[in-house]
Image (cartoon, helix red, strand yellow):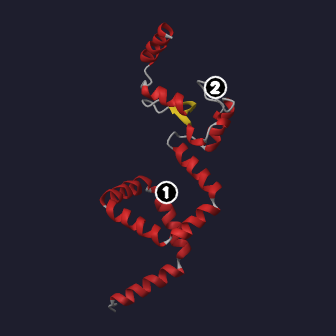
Amino acid sequence: MSWTKEQRAIYKKEYREKNKEQIAAYLKKWKGRNKEKMATYNKTYREKNVEYIAAYAKEYHEKNKEAIKEYREKNKEQIAIYKKEWNLKKYGLSLEDYNNMLDEQNHKCKLCLTSFTTLISKNIHIDHCHTTNKVRGVLCLHCNTGLGYFKDNTRTLTKAINYLQENG
């Protein structure tokens, strides 16, 4: 028996409805086994469809502006935690790791000892080596920026200290 396109579509839809749980379980396993393949595919797709994705996101945001605003207002705390966790992932840290580091440093900058309780969260930074990506501690904005400007070069930092002592 030969099926028409419409008949095949109806059969597929009915099959998916009847087997939702099995299909979901299979896809979950498949995605677990093919993480690299999925990441490569997604990256390639995003690179090829930058304009389409941006236009879709803009259109979606325009259509759902009020709902998005309402959602963000209702879920401020969860969103803040999610953003923090997302940012920490870059350094291979969990929220628990980060909180432990803060506790070990008495919630103060590891260099200048400024209390983090006096700073807003965007002025508290994870310090890490740009060569090895090893996390060294938590610093205030000024100390982290200073190290960055000196490119973590101990020789240049020593010269700066000597300069300040001689001309201070």
Q: Residue furthest bottom?
A: 1
Query: How far is disc 2 from disc 1 in space, using C-alphas?
Result: 44 Å
The label on residue 113 is 2
Q: Which residue is mark 1?
A: 32
Q: Residues within 10 Å of mark 2 (few under 14, many from 20)?
A: few
Quadrant in the rendering for residue 136 = top right
Q: Residue at x 41, y 52 (%)?
A: 36
In percent of width and height, residue 155 lies at: 42, 15
Q: Specify the label residue 65 is tagged with.
A: none
Helix, strand or loop at label 2? It is loop
Among numbered discs 2 and 1, the one appearing first in the sequence: 1
Which kind of residue does numbered mark 2 sit on? Leu
User: Label 1 crowding class (10 Å Cα cut-off): few <14, some 14-19, many 20+?
Assistant: few
Q: Is residue 111 above or below residue 126?
A: above
The vertical placement of 57 against 139, above or below, is: below
Q: Is residue 124 left or right of residue 44?
A: right
Height in image: 35 above or below 119?
below
Q: Image point 60% across, 26% down: which residue?
A: 110
Kindly check if marks 2 and 1 are in contact, taking CB atoms under 8 A apart as contact.
no
Q: Quadrant of the N terminus?
A: bottom left
Q: Residue at x 53, y 45 (%)?
A: 87
- Percent coordinates x, y for residue 123 in the rendering: 56, 38
Instruction: Examine the rendered structure and indicate whether residue 10 appears above or below residue 35.
Output: below
Q: Is residue 135 visible to the viewer in this orientation of the structure?
A: no
Residue 143 position in % (x across, y down)? 53, 28
Name the image quarter holding residue 122.
top right
> Identity of the amino acid at label 1?
Gly
Mark 1: which secondary structure? helix
* Residue 30 visible in the current orientation: yes
Please tell me which residue lies in front, 46 or 83: 83
